[in-house]
Amino acid sequence: MAGTHAENAHGAHGHDDHGHGQSGAGHATLGGYLTGFFLSIILTAIPFWIVMGDVFRSTSTAAVVLLVFAAVQIVVHMVYFLHMNSKSEGGWNMLAMIFTAVLVVITLAGSFWVMHHLNTNMMPGGAHDMQNMEGMRPAETPEPR
């Protein structure tokens, strides 16, 4: 017989390769965790300073900058703590993450689009109603019968 079942499952030397070479997943090292930790601290402290220091005059600009920092921090967590890259699990992890991101973007964009159009077309007291109300004077209001 060429080898036992345990030898076939774990290689000819009786031990498995712990993911060396074939899976491509990153290994957890103290240096990798410390790098991720310090990047996370920096990517949290800068947005905190932006908000608390009132750095930008426009709140829209501040919101966009905060969203960019949030996206970068998501990537840092995925790379340094979840050890996701294009080679882990044969690329399926990355494909699942991209699919999830596309679904989230479609859902958020559609929700904002619907809310914007509901706000502009159905809210009482909008710009169209205000123009009609400005032309009316108290004397022109109809009397109830």
Image (cartoon, rainbow, N blue to C red):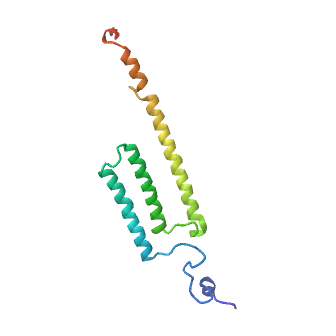
Image quadrant in which the N terminus is located: bottom right
Q: Quadrant of residue 43?
A: bottom left
Q: Residue at x 40, y 18 (%)?
A: 132
Q: Nearer the viewer, residue 122 or 137?
A: 137
Q: Report the residue that reaches farthest toward the bottom.
A: 1
On the image, the x and y values in percent for residue 46 come to 36, 57
Q: Position of residue 17 (x, y in %)?
A: 57, 82
Q: Position of residue 4 (x, y in %)?
A: 64, 89
Eyeballing the image, is 101 above or below 14? above
Number of numbered discs visible in the structure rendering:
0
Q: Quadrant location of residue 92?
A: bottom right
Q: Position of residue 84 (x, y in %)?
A: 52, 67
The answer to whether residue 137 is left or right of residue 35 is left
Q: Is residue 27 above or below residue 144?
A: below
The residue positioned 57% from the left and 66% from the top of the image is 86
Q: Residue at x 56, y 77 (%)?
A: 19
| 105 vs 24: above or below | above
Q: Residue at x 50, y 39 (%)?
A: 113
Q: Of residues 120 and 67, which is closer to you in this image?
A: 67
